[in-house]
Structure formats: structure tokens, C-alpha cells
């Protein structure tokens, strides 16, 4: 089936630290892959996306590369800020255009 | 640019009551989706519409749940005879069919309606 697995949180970091959140997906075809971010009390915001193998999505200093060989789409940021504290969701496009999400990873950045 | 709007933001009701939520998608977006998110989990797909047609429903959508999009614009999600397990955040999203990669247009989410069943 279609599933997404991402590392459990919470992930606690100091400001300016390097962030990695692992995400793997089941390999049914070549689905589009996404990272969404959810700030407290808000809905999901699209952070970045990649639509085919070896694509790199990037936005606001975050990057993720579509790795077909490892079925992964890990999220990285070189220097996090307090304002990056949020819950991050990895997602894949499934049949019928719906999204299948991972369980979310809470990130807390301390000053 | 107005985003996806959901009303109400919060709904508290007693078990057994009926509730209805509304979603107004981004103007001109043909596709509209409903998801449910429980605490500490990722959103789970419920159903989606292309224009006024409901094209897919999840097994999660029991017969107590019904969704409509009568004119292909706003949508409503109704839950009848609510149960404790219905407590969750209900998220609406919309996407566009315009563009060369129609099926890869990203979904834009509203802020959700949080339902609490007493």
C-alpha cells in the first residue's frame, strides 16, 4: 500500500544547529513527495515538494532530495531558528490525488 | 490572495448531536479534500471532490459522515450522531487543475475545525 514513515520526535535543537528529519515512503510507482509544516493552532503549509527522482525541493533554507534508490525524502536545514519550531509532516501523493502523511515530527528550537 | 477558509474554528458538542462544518476553497480551485487529524498524528484522507462530483471516499468515512459540494465551490462535512471517537481536527484542502502537471498541483490547507465531543 501507500505509506510514509518519518522519525518520531520531539527533536530538540539549539539555534543555528543542523536539522535532519528522516522520511521514507513505500515504492508504488514514482509518487510526488512533499514536506508540510504545521505551526501551533494552524493548518498545514506546504514547505517544499519534489515530483520525480533526484529532484531537490527547497524553500526557506530547507531542502529535501527525492531518492528513488533508498525511497527517501529527508528534510534538512543547515541552521535552524527559533521560528522553525513546529511539526513537520512528510507526505506522498497516492492514487486518486489524495495525500498520505507520516505521523509528524515535532521540532523545538531553543535560543 | 485568500486561502482556504474553514468554519467554525472550534466546535464543542454533546455526544449524539449532529454537527456540520464548512470549507471555502481557494477561488478557482477545482479539487477539494477533507482530512481528519487526531492529536499527535498526521492527517488522514476522508474524501475528495472534483468540482461537484465526489470522486473518492475513505473507509474512515462511515455512514454517519456525509460531505457535499453542491455547486462546485464551498463544501460541507456533516457528522450525524457524534461519538467520542469523532473528536479530532477536520482539515480541508484545495488544489488547482490548471497547469501542465495537473496532478502535481499542491494542496493548500485551511486552519481546520477542531471538534470536541463531550
Image (cartoon, grey):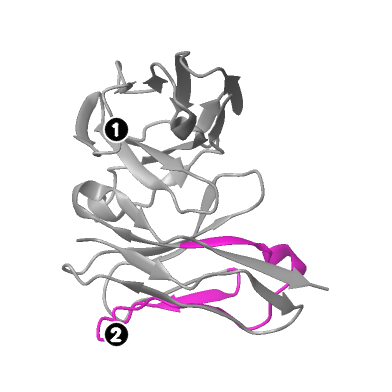
Q: Residue A72 carries which label?
A: none
Helix, strand or loop status at disc 2: loop
Helix, strand or loop status at disc 1: loop
Q: Residue A70 carries which label?
A: 2
Image: magenta residue range? A60-89
Q: Position of residue A61 (x, y in %)?
A: 60, 74
B38 displayed left or right of B77: right
Q: Where is residue A81 in the image (x, y as percent from the top left)?
A: 73, 72
* Chain on which label 2 sits: A
| Residue B107 lies in the magenta-colored region | no
A55 displayed left or right of B55: right
Q: In the rendered view, would you say A31 is above or below A54?
A: above
Q: Dot 2: few (<14), some (14–19), or many (≥20) neighbours within 10 Å?
A: few
Q: Going by the picture, which residue comes out furthest to the left?
A: A29
Q: Which residue is drawn at 33% across and 52% down?
A: A99
Q: How many labels does the image show?
A: 2
Nearest the viewer among B34 and A105 is: A105
Q: Which mark is residue B61?
A: 1
Amino acid at each position: 500500500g501507500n505509506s510514509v514513515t518519518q522519525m518520531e520526535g520531539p527533536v530538540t535543537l539549539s539555534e543555528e544547529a543542523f536539522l535532519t528529519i528522516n522520511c521514507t515512503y513505500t515504492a508504488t510507482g514514482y509518487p510526488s513527495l512533499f514536506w508540510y509544516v504545521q505551526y501551533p493552532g494552524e493548518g498545514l503549509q506546504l514547505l517544499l515538494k519534489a515530483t520525480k527522482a533526484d529532484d531537490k525541493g527547497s524553500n526557506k533554507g530547507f531542502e529535501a532530495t527525492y531518492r528513488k534508490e533508498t525511497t527517501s525524502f529527508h528534510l534538512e536545514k543547515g541552521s535552524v531558528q527559533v521560528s522553525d519550531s513546529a511539526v513537520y509532516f512528510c507526505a506522498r501523493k497516492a492514487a486518486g490525488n489524495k495525500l498520505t502523511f507520516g505521523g509528524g515530527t515535532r521540532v523545538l528550537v531553543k535560543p | 490572495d485568500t486561502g482556504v477558509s474553514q468554519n467554525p474554528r472550534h466546535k464543542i458538542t454533546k455526544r449524539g448531536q449532529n454537527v456540520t462544518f464548512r470549507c471555502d476553497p481557494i477561488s478557482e480551485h477545482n479539487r477539494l479534500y477533507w482530512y481528519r487529524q487526531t492529536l499527535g498524528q498526521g492527517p488522514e484522507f476522508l474524501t475528495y471532490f472534483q468540482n461537484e462530483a465526489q470522486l473518492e471516499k475513505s473507509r474512515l468515512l462511515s455512514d454517519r459522515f456525509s460531505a457535499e459540494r453542491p455547486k462546485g465551490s464551498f463544501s460541507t462535512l456533516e457528522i450525524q450522531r457524534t461519538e467520542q471517537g469523532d473528536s479530532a481536527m477536520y482539515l480541508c484542502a484545495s488544489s488547482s487543475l490548471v497547469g501542465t502537471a495537473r496532478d502535481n498541483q499542491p494542496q493548500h490547507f485551511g486552519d481546520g475545525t477542531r471538534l470536541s465531543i463531550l
